[in-house]
Image (cartoon, rainbow, N blue to C red):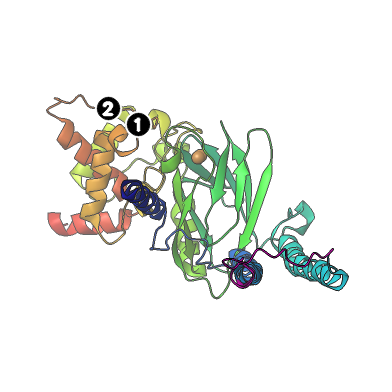
Amino acid sequence: MPNRRWFRLIGLSILFILLLGGCSFDTIQSALDPQAPIPRAQHDLLIWVSWLSLIVILGVGGVLFVSLIRFRAKANDDRIPTQSHGNTALEIGLIALATVITILVVVPSVRTIFKTEGRIQAEDITADDIIVNVTGYQWWWAFDYPDLGITTANELHIPKGKRVILNLASADVLHSFWVPKLSGKRDLIPNQDNQLWFVTDENTPEGVYYGQCAELCLGAHAYMRFRVIVDSEADFATWIDKFQSIAPLQASTQASVQLVQVDPQIEQGKLLFKQKGCGACHAIKGYSGGAPDKPNLTNFGLRNSLAAGVLEMPADDLELKKEHLMRWLRDPQEVKPTNRMPTLWAQDDPKADEEIAAIAAYLLSLGNEAETQASVGGNYGN
Ligand code: CUA
């Protein structure tokens, strides 16, 4: 029946194309492109086991294939084949071979587990380690550096070459921290203290790495992304300083004397940030207290991404940064369905464009104060 064959062929082709849809040929978030010691060890193990499996498949499949061809019944040959009851030497040989293969898989597996897993006990933590308390929320990440007094969201800065110890907690449901190129994967579980540690080394390129929540947490789970930025020692020190140099809230309200000319749009955005209620949720060190269970926006202008890694904010493209931030502020649900950020402007609000642009300008200026003041200084002839 040729029709049925065609149906089967088309069905298989569709299945194949659907399966291919799961593939991605850029490796921004691939465990097959490891860039740090732990994922490298895991990758090496995967490759080793894959080669062994291939040898087993070819061996067993080859014997089966040869048997099927060589020993199949010939036409008009009704003879019963010679009956035998096993072959002791062959059976012992196969058991020995299976044992060897099992040892070849188990020994490197257990060694890799001991090398990469395991909790770092309090007494083994050194002053050199970077400690970060990671809290998963539906659907974003809080990163808190207790030793440095820094709280930020969705972007984890680490210095190259240091050991990073993450204390993982969840504020609501299960989440899972995963940066395939740098670290293993571990769940964030409510009421359970989990830890994940990883290191980078001299072969880890500095730059931005992609992370993703790897545990179905409903709603915007697929959009619960994050970035890890591997900095040089000097860049990391600069980043820390950008946070530590901001005076805390109480101190800054005392010293409210403006010494520098500030862009009026940024000033307007700064006021609107409070008037529109943004400050009730979002903390900005030195300006807004916010709520601890909402993303902290201190130095927001230094970020490479927005809405937990959903929209890019490339450092060298201010226009695109502005465009993406305004799109997000105008209609957060359009960018990231089911997220918990409200829409602050009615569809027909005539002031929406101006206000959104002002808040965007203010947020993008955070952490870039020196640059914005300098450019404004030029524009206004001061
Ligand atoms: Cu958090 Cu999926």
Of residue 381 and residue 317, the one placed in the foreground of this image is: 317
Query: Label 1 amino acid?
Result: Cys
Residue at 31% in and 34% down: 332
Query: Label 2 amino acid?
Result: Leu
* Res 19 visible: yes
Q: Is residue 211 above or below residue 285?
A: below
Q: Which mark is residue 278?
A: 1
Of residue 307 and residue 221, the one placed in the foreground of this image is: 221
Q: Residues within 10 Å of mark 2 (few under 14, many from 20)?
A: some
Q: Residues within 10 Å of mark 1 (few under 14, many from 20)?
A: some
**Quadrant of the snapshot with the C terminus:** bottom left
Q: Position of residue 60 (x, y in %)?
A: 66, 67
Magenta stretch, residue numbers: 66-85
Q: Is residue 271 above or below residue 110?
A: above
| Residue tagged 2 | 344
Marks 1 and 2: CB-CB under 8 Å?
yes
Secondary structure, magenta segment, majority class = loop
Q: CA distance from mark 1 to mark 2?
A: 9 Å
Q: Quadrant of residue 273?
A: top left
Closer to the chain start, of discs 1 and 2, is 1
Q: Quadrant of residue 239?
A: bottom left
Q: Position of residue 114 (x, y in %)?
A: 75, 61
Q: Position of residue 343 (x, y in %)?
A: 28, 28
* Res 149 visible: no
Dot 2 falls on a residue whose secondary structure is loop
Q: Which mark is residue 107?
A: none
Left or right of residue 50: residue 276:
left
Disc 1 or disc 2, which is closer to the eye? 2
Of residue 218 and residue 312, the one placed in the foreground of this image is: 218
Q: Position of residue 161 (x, y in %)?
A: 58, 69
Dot 1 falls on a residue whose secondary structure is helix
